[in-house]
Image (cartoon, rainbow, N blue to C red):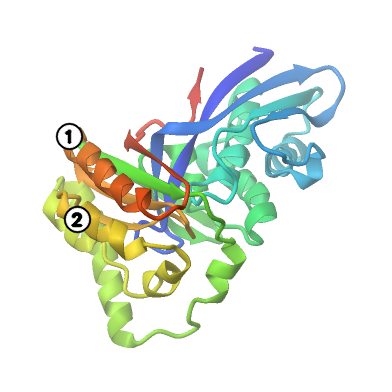
Amino acid sequence: MKEIKIFSPATVANVSCGFDVLGFCLDTVGDEMVIKKTVEKGVKITKIEGYDLPLETKKNVAGVAALALYNHANPDCGFDIEIYKKIKPGSGIGSSSASASGAVFALNELLGKPYNKTQLSNFAMKGEAVASGSEHADNIAPGIFGGFTLVKSNQPLKILELPTPSNLYATIIHPQIEVKTAEARSILPKNVPMQDAITQWSNVGSFVHALHTNDYSLLGESLQDVIVEPYRSKLIPYFSEVQKAALAKSALGSGISGSGPSVFSLSEGIETAKKVEKAIQEVYAKTGIEFYTFTSKINAEGIKIL
């Protein structure tokens, strides 16, 4: 195989209680990438459509991730990368991680799959660090592994694949404002009360158990964030109104996607998810802030070959 076209999906990180460790993969929105083998050695980004991003390999998240794998594999060929960017940078649904994950996935396929998913995640994290300033895998992992994932540790990297309840849907609203990841991190407290910590790890444990037992009610109870959301929600206009509107239409729960500004809601069944989508559209339609919404089944496969 000398050429491959892939779909690299959007992802939701943190998932309320699971700051920097939990994530899940979406199915409706994602980047498309075309990667070609070349005779000339090295990695080049030859085209980017959709958003104004650097073509210079060492300044682009996809390029940096691809180089990490390329330098490790040291193949006797090169690669040209085309990126058709559908996920808006800074949206909070894993734009940078989709580019980084897609690049390493595609190179691995063209080289005959010498690396496993954990190794690919490690390479992709090098690219993610260009965008966020640090290596973390909570968006990378669900894109590469699919479904729900938990990052048990970064050093060494250990990713746990979690089961996905079959009738679980996500609804996303993306207000057209920018929340910088660095700012969203800077406002977080350095210390938290013991009782809040206990509540948070209780919710993470309950959430993981709910995924394993298909317990939608427990899953909803566990989508509570007492540590990060109280601070970051201040950066997202009408966050509490969106949350209330979603819950009023029987969403299991809502939270900030990544560092925002996107907000996710989880629902049991597509009908409920669509009602939630309509309700949150009505909230933002009155605000004068541009936005878009979409509903997606949880993508259990991750990156797909087109």
Outermost residue on the right side: it is: 40
Q: Which residue: 35% across, 52% down?
A: 286
* Disc 2: CA contacts within 10 A as few (<14), some (14-19) or many (>=20): some
Instruction: Residue 153 in the image: state x and y as whole percent.
Output: 48, 61
Point out which mark residue 271 bears: 1
User: Are the residues flagged by discs 1 and 2 in contact, CB closer than 8 Å?
Assistant: no
Q: Label 1 vs label 2: CA separation?
A: 14 Å
Label placed on residue 17 = none
Q: Quadrant of residue 151?
A: bottom left
Q: Position of residue 287 (x, y in %)?
A: 40, 55
Tell me: 274 left or right of 298: left
Up-down relation of residue 84 to residue 177 (above or below):
above
Q: Which residue is more in the foreground, 257 or 50?
A: 50
Where in the figure is residue 179, as x and y percent of width and height? 55, 60
Q: Tell me the amino acid under the disc marked 1.
A: Glu
Determine whether 229 is above or below 91 in the image.
below
